[in-house]
Image: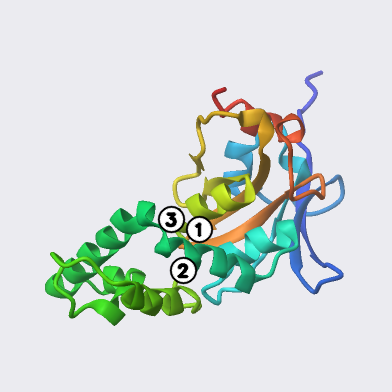
Amino acid sequence: MKVKKTTPNYHINLLQSSHGVKIETIVKSNDSPRLKLPKWVGIIFPNDSIHISLISIAMDGNCLYSSIGKALGITIIKLRKMVAQSIYLPENDSTIQFWRELHNLAVKEKNIELMTEYGHMKCIANIPLERQITKQEKKLIYREIMKSSFWGEEYTIRILEKMLNIKVLVVNGDKTSLVKPLDHEGVYQHTYIMVYLKHNHYSLISYKKQTLFSHINLPIDIKNKIIV
């Protein structure tokens, strides 16, 4: 007699943490209705999916800062100040120039998406690109970065990684892949934070109820993707 193979059932619990944060937890169950696991969990964490939780973050323009801040216990304002203050460093002038060029191009081509993304450059839009901006003009950009309209992006991650000695592992929900880092030096010296990016919104990933990781206690599926 043939025995029909069965697969474990899963259901999703929505819990409320002590901080009022909604937590989506995938739980194995033999008596719950069979629900399909979110695609990104099964692909990125094939061996650890049962231990993965997603902590939802408000969609208020602070999602990346909120995700990192919840993991580290640091306020959004303090994280934004770290990023805003970095624009005064000469080493970041090329990034500011890049932002200016993209904003001007977006305005010229009437690209609403880019105009929104680089809207923090609107404050100095009338300054010719060939002229280097002054410290006073950088102060205008500083104020814009402190606003929720300045979303967290690659520059934000780079600066916070450097300032806090962390590595932010971004799982791209749109492509179901690990965005970064795939390789870097000093892999064992960093504290890791995992975040989930979907439609320009970040959420914090929890593994075995933890949100901060050394290299040794990262999920095996993630460690296998990091080249030492």
Spatial separation of the CA atoms under disc 1 and disc 2: 14 Å
The residue lying toward the viewer, choosing from 215 and 59, is 215
Task: Please rate how many residues cluster around mark 1, counting C-alpha atoms within 10 Å: few if below 14, some from 14 to 19, many from 20.
Answer: some
The residue lying toward the viewer, choosing from 228 and 189, is 189
Q: Quadrant of residue 215?
A: top right
Please tell me which of labels 1 and 2 falls first in the chain: 2
Residue at 63% from the left image edge and 33% from the top image edge: 222
Please tell me which of labels 1 and 3 falls first in the chain: 3
Residue 74 horizontal side relative to residue 131, left or right:
right
Up/down of 171 relative to 75, above or below: above
Spatial separation of the CA atoms under disc 1 and disc 3: 18 Å
Q: Secondary structure at mark 3?
A: helix
Q: Which mark is residue 198?
A: 1
Q: Position of residue 101 (x, y in %)?
A: 20, 63
Residue type marked 2:
Trp
Q: Secondary structure at mark 1?
A: strand
Residue type marked 3:
Tyr
The residue lying toward the viewer, choosing from 74 and 175, is 74
Q: Which mark is residue 151?
A: 2
Tag nearer the camera, 1 or 3: 3
Residue type marked 1:
Lys
Tag nearer the camera, 1 or 2: 2
Residue matched to label 3? 155
Q: Secondary structure at mark 2?
A: loop
Q: Position of residue 205 (x, y in %)?
A: 68, 52
Spatial separation of the CA atoms under disc 2 and disc 3: 10 Å
Q: Are marks 1 and 2 in contact (CB under 8 Å)?
A: no
Residue at 75% from the left image edge and 68% from the top image edge: 22
